[in-house]
Image (spheres, rainbow, N blue to C red):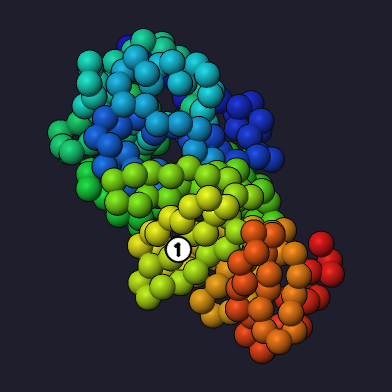
Amino acid sequence: MAYSRLNSNHAYQIMNRLIRTLIVEDMPVQAADIAAFVGSRPELALSGVASSVEEAIDLIAVHDPDLVLLDVELRGGTGFDILDSLGHWRFKVIFLTAHETFAIRAIRAGALDYLVKPFDRDQFATALGRLADYLPATVGQTAIATEVYRQRPLQRLALREGKILHLLSPAEIYYLEATGEHTVFHLADRQIQVTQRLKEYEDLLPSSNFMRSHQSYLVNLHHVSSLDYSGHLRLRDGVRVPVSERRIQDVADRLKML
């Protein structure tokens, strides 16, 4: 079968928004890890996670993804069966496989790249970098998580806590707290603890909303109700968050701009 390629018209349609990304993986733990990788990339928006051939075909029809991270071996068939069923498509594909023997077929299928599981963030970033070759130059430039890019809205964040994958909007986050090697996300009704350091999320979350009030705290300024110059912020839920002496004027200046 002749597999289709991402056409240039579709590429120009996505140049001014995040790249819709669909994960197709039938192993829950691996799917959670991949979703966390996607969540760490500010240019990607996670559209959904499918675990079977039928579910993947349905989600592709619903979400019209730009990028599909496609496991080769699935319940009820293979990733290649999905492409065969579609016949033609506009998205790019990165195949995920536990065996290098599928590499040649993946290339023949027009894959952007293939990753042998388990893979790490650097390998994922390298594969993702090839997407820039199929998009306008402006997309490749904004894919870098610079301060300018951080001003753009992040739609959803994928957080893995043990065997649970949490998907949340940045607006739900009241503040983040560094606790040793972990970061705790404080929401209105619950807390989520993840293994990544606070700095990773400071780089990821939009700087227009989030600011360090203290070495160990990153605060969503839109949830702040008052600033006490003695050294703390009061949030809308009544919680007090520390503000270091050297940051207090910067925090005050930012709050005045909201």
The residue sitting at 37% across, 18% down in the picture is: 55
| Depth check, front residue: 170 or 105 | 170
The residue indicated by pointer 1 is: 184
The residue sitting at 23% across, 43% down in the picture is: 116
- Picture coordinates of residue 69 (x, y %)? 38, 35
- Picture coordinates of residue 196 (x, y %)? 39, 63
The residue sitting at 57% across, 63% down in the picture is: 175
- Residue 221 in view: no
The residue sitting at 74% across, 79% down in the picture is: 228
Q: Is residue 23 left or right of residue 89?
A: left
Q: Residue furthest right?
A: 256
Position of the N terminus by quadrant: top left
How many numbered circles does the render carry?
A: 1
Residue 35 vertical placement versus 54 (above, below): below
- Residue 167 in view: yes
Q: Is residue 188 left or right of residue 233?
A: left
Residue 120 vertical placement versus 109 (above, below): below
Q: Amino acid at mark 1?
A: Val
Q: Is residue 7 left or right of residue 102?
A: right
| Depth check, front residue: 70 or 228 | 228
Query: Quadrant location of residue 155?
Result: top right
- Picture coordinates of residue 195 (x, y %)? 35, 62
| Depth check, front residue: 20 or 162 | 162
Query: Quadrant location of residue 57?
Result: top left
| Depth check, front residue: 147 or 194 | 194
